[in-house]
Image (cartoon, rainbow, N blue to C red):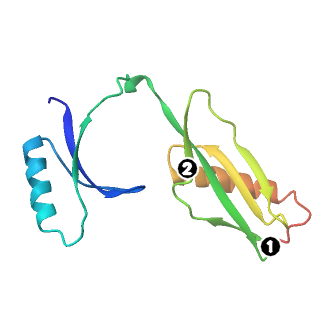
Amino acid sequence: MKNKIYLVIGGEYSDWFIDSYFVNKDEAEKYCFVKNKNQDSELILRVQKVPLNSAKMDFDKIQLKKWWKVSYVLVKGKWLIREIYDDYILYSGERKETTSERYNFNRHVWFIKCTADTWEQAKKIANDLIVHVSTELPDVAR
């Protein structure tokens, strides 16, 4: 039973949830007994054995990078940043290039994607780029 936990799960069909977990099967079964006994509904909890660390990988060799998507909206001739702090994808390998995409019906939305460690760094890269690029656009009122 080394490196295993016992999940106490409940629900039915596609509506399942994790109620709690135990490292001891006996305690998990007793918990289920008490919980089911005191339950008003007909919810039945089950014990499920789950192996821990089932994926044997050398995580030290994986160097993750974040490729952020910084969004801007054009309001009264100014590009305003949308503060979405967790809009990034994780990747590994070659550094991705910074890209700039302007879209939507009236081209009033701009996405800048860049590699950075933090949201603040990504925001600085994007702000520097949008100031540079937006000054070259004839259709943006300044």
Dividing the picture into quarters, in which one does residue 35 lie? bottom left
Q: Residue furthest bottom?
A: 76
Q: Is residue 35 left or right of residue 87?
A: left
Q: Which residue is mark 1?
A: 77
Q: Nearer the viewer, residue 74 or 42?
A: 42
Residue at position x 64%, y 49% from top? 125
The numbered mark at residue 121 is 2
Give the residue type that dot 1 points to. Answer: Gly
C-beta proximity under 8 Å, tags 1 and 2? no
Q: Position of residue 64 (x, y in %)?
A: 49, 34
Residue in the image at 75% along x and 49% along y: 100
**Image x and y of residue 130, in percent:** 74, 56
Badge count: 2
- For residue 63, which numbered disc appears in the image? none
Identified by mark 2, the residue type is Gln
Distance between the alpha carbons at the discs numbered 1 and 2: 25 Å
Q: Secondary structure at mark 1?
A: loop
Quadrant in which the C terminus appears: bottom right
SS at badge 2: helix
Query: Which residue: 88% across, 59% down?
Result: 137
Q: Is residue 138 above or below residue 24?
A: below
Q: Is residue 85 above or below residue 139?
A: above
